[in-house]
Image (tube, rainbow, N blue to C red):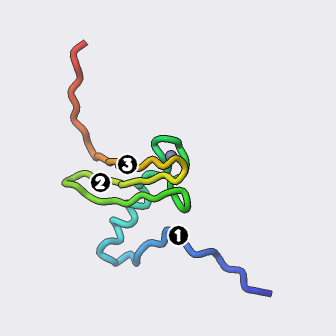
């Protein structure tokens, strides 16, 4: 009987002591999971999301295999906006 093992972990993290381990962990937690246009899952065969940084912003270049949406999702820690007077 063949040995039954777990499938490879598609989201394997680097060793905890690696200099980028915390960034890799945050990426897995914060990246877009669903397409902002159609709601399909972004993981696996259905697209991808690659993170880069611009100043203090974390930008996720994202493509959806379901509808073809391709764009950027930006994560902020804090936003200051102005509101028109009522
Ligand atoms: Zn989509």
Q: Mark on residue 10?
A: 1
> Circle 2 sits in a helix, a strand or a loop, which is it?
strand
Please indicate whether residue 50 sits to the left or right of residue 47 in the image.
left
Q: In the rendered view, tell whether residue 61 sits above or below residue 36.
A: below
Q: Residue at x 45, y 43 (%)?
A: 36
Q: Nearer the viewer, mark 3 or mark 2?
A: 3
Find the residue positioned furthest to the right. 1
Please indicate whether residue 68 sits to the left or right of residue 21 in the image.
right
Q: Residue at x 47, y 41 (%)?
A: 37
> Circle 3 sits in a helix, a strand or a loop, which is it?
strand
**What residue sits right under mark 2 in the picture?**
58
Q: Tag 1: Cα neighbours inside 10 Å, few (<14), some, or many (≥20)?
A: few
Q: Position of residue 42 (x, y in %)?
A: 50, 54
Confirm if mark 1 falls within 8 A of ligand 1.
no
Find the residue positioned furthest to the top. 86
Q: Earlier in the sequence, mark 3 or mark 1?
A: 1
Q: Disc 3, disc 1: CB below 8 Å? A: no
**What residue sits right under mark 3 in the picture?**
71
Q: Nearer the viewer, mark 3 or mark 1?
A: 3
């Amino acid at each position: 009987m063949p040995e039954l093992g777990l499938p490879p972990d598609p989201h394997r993290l680097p060793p905890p002591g690696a200099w980028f381990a915390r960034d890799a962990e945050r990426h897995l937690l914060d990246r877009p999971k669903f397409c902002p246009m159609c709601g399909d899952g972004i993981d696996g065969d259905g697209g991808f999301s690659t993170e880069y940084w611009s100043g203090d912003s974390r930008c996720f270049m994202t493509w959806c295999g379901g509808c073809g949406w391709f764009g950027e999702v930006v994560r902020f820690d804090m936003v200051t906006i102005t509101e028109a007077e009522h």
